[in-house]
Image (tube, coloured by chain):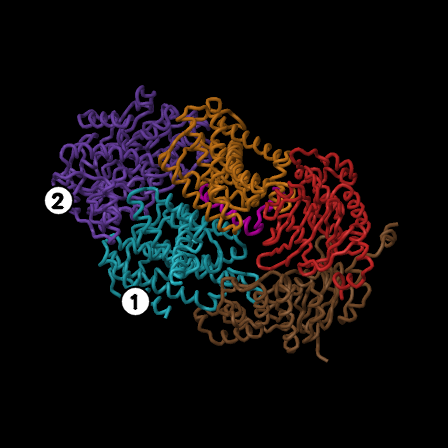
Amino acid sequence: MSGIGAALLNSLDIGLLLFIIAVGLNIVFGVLNIINFAHGALYMLGAYLAFTLINIAGMPFWAALLLAPIGVAILAVIIDRVLLRFIYSRDVADSLLLTFAILLIINESVRMIWGSGIHVVQPPDLLSGSVRLLGSSVATYSLFVIAIGLLLLAGLWYLFNRTRIGRIMRAAALDRDMAEALCINTRLVVTGVFAFGAWLAAVGGVMAAPMRALDPGMGDKIIIESFIVVVIGGLGSFPGALLGAIILGLIHGFGGRYLPEVNLLLPFVGMALVLLFKPHGIMGKGATA
Amino acid sequence: MILDVRNIQTFYGESQALHGVTLQLEAGETVCILGRNGAGKSTTLKSIMGLTPPRSGEVIYDGKPVQGWPAHRIARAGIGYVPEDRRIFPGLTVRDNLDVAAYQRKGSTARWTVDGILKKYEMLGERAGQDGATLSGGQQQMLAVARSLMIQPRLLLLDEPNEGLAPVIVQQIGELIDDLSQTTTILFTDQSVRFALKHAQRAYILEKGQVVHEASSDELRTDQATQDRFLSVA
Amino acid sequence: MKKTHIKNFLVAMTATAALGTASTGYAEDPIRIGGLYILSGSAATYGEFAQKGIDLAVDEINDSGGILGRQIEMIYEDTQGKASVAIQAARKLVYSEGADALVGLDSSGVAQGMVPTMPELQKPLIITHAATPDVTGKLCNPFTYRISVNVAQNMKAAAMVAAETDATNWTTIGPDYAFGHQSWEFFGNYLKEINPDVNLMSETNFPRFGAEDFTPFIDRVMDSDAEGVLISVWGGDLVNFIRQANNRGFFEQDLELMFTVGAATEVLTALGDEMPEGVHLSTRYWYEAYDNDINDRFVKSYIDAYGNPPSYNAEGAYAAIYAYKQAMEAAGNTDGPAVAKALSGMSMEAPNGTVTFRKGDNQAMVSPNWGISGPMHAEHGIRTLTSLQIFDGEKVARTIDETGCKL
Amino acid sequence: MSNPVLTITSLTKRFGGVTAVSDINLEVMPRETIAIIGPNGAGKTTFYNMVSGRMLPTEGKIMLDGKDITGLPPHKISRLGVSRSFQLNNIFPEMTVQENVEVVLSAYHGHSRKLFNIASRNTGIQQEAVEFLERLGIDSLKEQRAEVISYGDKRLLEIAMVLATQPKLVLLDEPTAGMTPDETRRTTRLIKKLADSGDYTFMITEHDMDVVFNLADRILVMHRGEKLFAGTPEEVKNHPEVRVAYLGEEDDEAVEEANP
Amino acid sequence: MKNKVLMAILAVVIAGLIAVPWIASYFYVFIFTEILVLGLFAASFNLIFGYTGMLSFGHAAFFGIGSYATALVLIHLQWSFLACLLVSMGASALLALVIGFLSVRLNEVYFAMLTLAFGMMVFAIAYQWRSLTNGSDGLAGFTLGSFGLGLDLTLGNPLVYYHVVLGIVVIASIVLYLICRSSFGMILKAIRQNPERVSFAGLNVRTYRLVAFIIAGTFAGLAGGLMAPFLRVASPELLHWSMSAEPILMAILGGTGYFLGPFIGSAAFVLLETWITTYTESWMLVLGIILAMMVIFFRKGLLGTAIDWWMEVKK
């Protein structure tokens, strides 16, 4: 039946977008052991920068996809050097609170700069419109999101398993002292990883911009979704982020479609069940970085 | 003198582990630090390495005071370190464990390369693609030593290289130390007097965070009283 | 968004320094009107457009001598679309900022929570947007007025439009709160009255207000037997909805689509030609629908000032300020109960014709507009409305008995 | 002849394929001080963790005063009379020294369930707390916040807290680790005094042989998870195998024999 | 001596609070009602956060349940206000028992995440169970009848309601304070500093955490019960995670190490918000900066920093 095919594609579309965002949160937790509450705000910033580059500066979407995340990553370096450096040695609760403060600051700055209203970004012409697939009509852009999600998945896998820099990140995450003793500047790795996490969030933001209207509350919604993803998949686990994102995508896709009466409840029920029975998530921490 | 450690005091929080350790190494020497567990042997190596920076005292390496430097800077200056529990990165293959550490100082040529090591140490070469964490204890120790070579060290710190290993492996580790000592200065710790005296030229004995005895291997070998007093149960 | 009034700030600071004393207006003080709108989140454009309409009215009135010789000063608070925030904000406006009267409210849910507290504040409130029938129905009180079309009026008109179509199986997609649910309820009842043969489907769709993903709901409708769909999604949500529906090929289906607030210019502006052609769009005021001097002047000065045509929300807010001018001048002062009393039964000229606040329920008799989306407007960059119908506000209104209001 | 306080039978702990503690049997008699020693990796800490309930034994039985306590959670074992100190400081840093002991005392006396008493007016417990501080010679510090007193005093405070639960058996894990030589001597003297008072039964681990031989009535030597030898300090000193365990295998022949 | 000074200061503060309607503008009656209710909410939260060391991200569940309970009782049963508050406390205690039973065994982040999940579950239920809760619109249109105990109070009058709230909050705070000062309270503090040591003192840490969680939930429910008639509406945003963030902010702002910290935090929070929003909408920006400074540099909060400063001066 076309309904299931459509719901499945929709789940994948949501799931892979969530993966792009949540995997950044997870990498940051895996290496830095902080939970970045401001991750959603960085996602939002990516979307707004893309809006500015496309609608104000008149750049093509592709240029924005390239530039906006770099801008957010640079901001992340500043955040790391100015604020986060104080709390790396403290417990996780402090990092939650400080990044919550950063979230408030970014949210309000976005409101001041871009206003409270909604903004809209057009998808590039190449990706507007829809195609028929699995017996239903699917937005070309959704397919693009799925494709980029899979591309990033492959890219991340390659980065962590096939490149030296990825292995250095893993080594620093696994054993910071040992990495230090092997000439690795872990302080630099920490900054780099935080910036990389922010970059991923911003890529998610740029990808989301043509699908969703931009408003200053968009980061708050996505951060809770990301929490659900990483908790279900396993904090700090790279494959866990994928699994969690797909599960949440399915919950949204099928829950909204077949159980609309309780669709808000389902993600949290899923999250609670995982925490109760497998507190460290389905894939657990430390399997691979 | 390649290493000159002067009266270092190191704390874990408020617990004092080193109460003023002083020791020297000439380039080319192989020296052992002996002592019962809890005596401060590991802490001495970690303090030299910058992993537990000493609160006072000096660590002079190659004429430069390095205490207070971040560990990676000390490593880059040419001190290699193999920790007590090996600390192989799990999930990374043998080759990747070596690759992560690959470092080349400016102006020097790399004596040790990943491929060179895998060729020289067959036991590692055969397992290049295997997850480092799945190796046996002895193999992990080999890998840990090999990994420390990747930073092209001029001074190698080995913390209890024999701990928990079967006798036949201990012998191999001894051979490895002998081999490396041809080209590199080595400072290692051990609990076994026999092993230490066989492979080191000199030894320091630590007790309660202080150097209580210093002697050449030949002197110590015949000095039963000192052995019993500081190292055994007496 | 909000103008920073230096004077306000000084007043506030001196007030706070001594924990303030209630500022009771001196004759030379401006008349203060508090505006309660959604100024953040996905519906914030509505607050923005309302502010634009109000500012226009305030400038016009102030330039021509003000009310009772006093200037008008606006103070805005963000309701965030939440009743609890709105009630707190209203208290702040009345007790701290010394507001003489209130305008605003976008969300029906907020209005339902807010309206019962009005007698406590003893200041009149003219609702300019929120459409739930209850506030001029079972929750009515002598301080609450509404100058815009309510759900009952609009849905009666909607039912009349729907009855003309061939569709018999009807369902809805609406926001999951009072407005969405009441729209469907009234629409269904009126439609059944006109045509008992229609089938109101039990499978309805109420996505969360502010939801990001409407595709599951769109898919549900596309998979069902529905022939007609009442869509009461609005604001940023409607923009998201239309774009996602476009992507899904929703508009290529053979469906009668009725957007109950689809001709809001906020939405039309944001969407441009992404808004499909040939669907039924409604608005509480269409800027090209009225041919009178006031409307001509209003539309012209609005476009001159802001570059785009006024929305119904701007018009309602604009008219509400003039309603206060007339009522305050009739009462001769700005005393809350007196002004409220003057509003009751008052008739005034507004861009959408003669507007009367019905004595029994304080609901203005204004006309819902329905039309079909046409080609893009050459200048305004939005869809035009064709086959425009203006339903007489009084005829589509419930009788006072039906409203349940006892004043 | 009294019954043993603690009877351990074939206690074993395996982690995956590794046997950390293997088949240990031990009886601890009332009022004796027994020391557990052994080179690195001998399994002392694992052994301790099982006795205090922090780890579940793979096999074997632990009986306290004839009651089976194998596998009980720490708080239950503690209630039954086994109290332990830790290698790393284990105090309540933000409370005063006296309050630290009061916490343990109110737990012991069941006051901790009282929601509406005023803790700071509980003079009975306060007096008792001071008594324990006096016993360890740190009563002059009672008003200080625990985090600011010296490291050695903290270790003594911890012993005071351990004693406050009136335990049948006191486990001390490296009581002098990290102390200066002066502090070590002072602490050894104090423990000796407590042991001589006949009120307590101690089981201690320690690397400092001076401390061990000073305090222990009996010594259990562990090596590679197994019991190597148990006996009086004199017997242990002269036992050849113990020497080998500490000083290492003698020669290469041994290796070659093992691996022909 | 020190105690007497403290008592005198407290007496002056309470007298000042009683006198608010006569010394401040009418508007401040509302402001101070809000400060008191949120202060109690934050103080209840601090019992588990500041005292026991558990960072809950779902405390609004109990606050919101309290609000809904009072609203529902007023709408359907029209019981006296006192009875409503008792129902609110009972409902939130029950909810805290269930959530706490499942949550207290987890530590740190996982506890925070699980309480967040449960809190949002309650939110989602309130949002979607339209027939009971009126969905996202919330329950409105209820009016307060009698107070109970035969007292003749016009609760609809904000002045009267303010004094009722003041009385109830003061009584509830005294009870909470006594609990904090009790042996039980001392154990909670000990658990925050070193849970393992407490368990080696023979106590089941989980049980103590659970009891603390239930007490905190119950008082949050009471605060919620006081909030609904004040706001005139019980709506899902009272249950949302962002509402759970408020007591966290207040406790940290005021100082988590002190019983009165959360009240100071609540006052600072509400007053700053009121004043700052008068001339700029960017209140959240200011709040964010303040919070960041507090976390990095002034971990003891306003009260703790002030006390430290005072001690310094006295030296």
Same subunit: marks 2 and 1: no
Identified at 30% across, 62% down, the residue is E13
- Furthest residue to the top? C378
Apparent colour of chain E: cyan
The residue wearing badge 1 is E149
Apparent colour of chain C: purple
C-alpha distance separating marks 2 and 1 = 48 Å
Q: Could you tell me which chain the residue with mark 1 belongs to?
A: E
Q: Which mark is residue C27?
A: 2
Apparent colour of chain B: red
Apparent colour of chain D: brown
* Visible residue check, residue E88: no
Where residue A92 sits in the image (x, y, percent)? Answer: 52, 50
Q: Which residues are magenta?
A: A260-289
Task: Decide which of C384, A184 is in the foreground and name it.
Answer: A184
Judge whether residue C106 is colored magenta. Answer: no
Quadrant of image for the C terminus of chain B:
bottom right
Chain letter matching colour orange: A
Where residue C206 sits in the image (x, y, percent)? Answer: 40, 39
* Visible residue check, residue A109: yes
Task: Decide which of C239, D153 is in the foreground and name it.
Answer: D153
Q: Element under label 2?
A: loop
Q: Quadrant of residue C222?
A: top left
Where residue E22 sits in the image (x, y, percent)? Answer: 22, 59
Identified at 45% across, 68% down, the residue is E182
Identified at 59% across, 72% down, the residue is D163
Q: Element under label 1?
A: loop
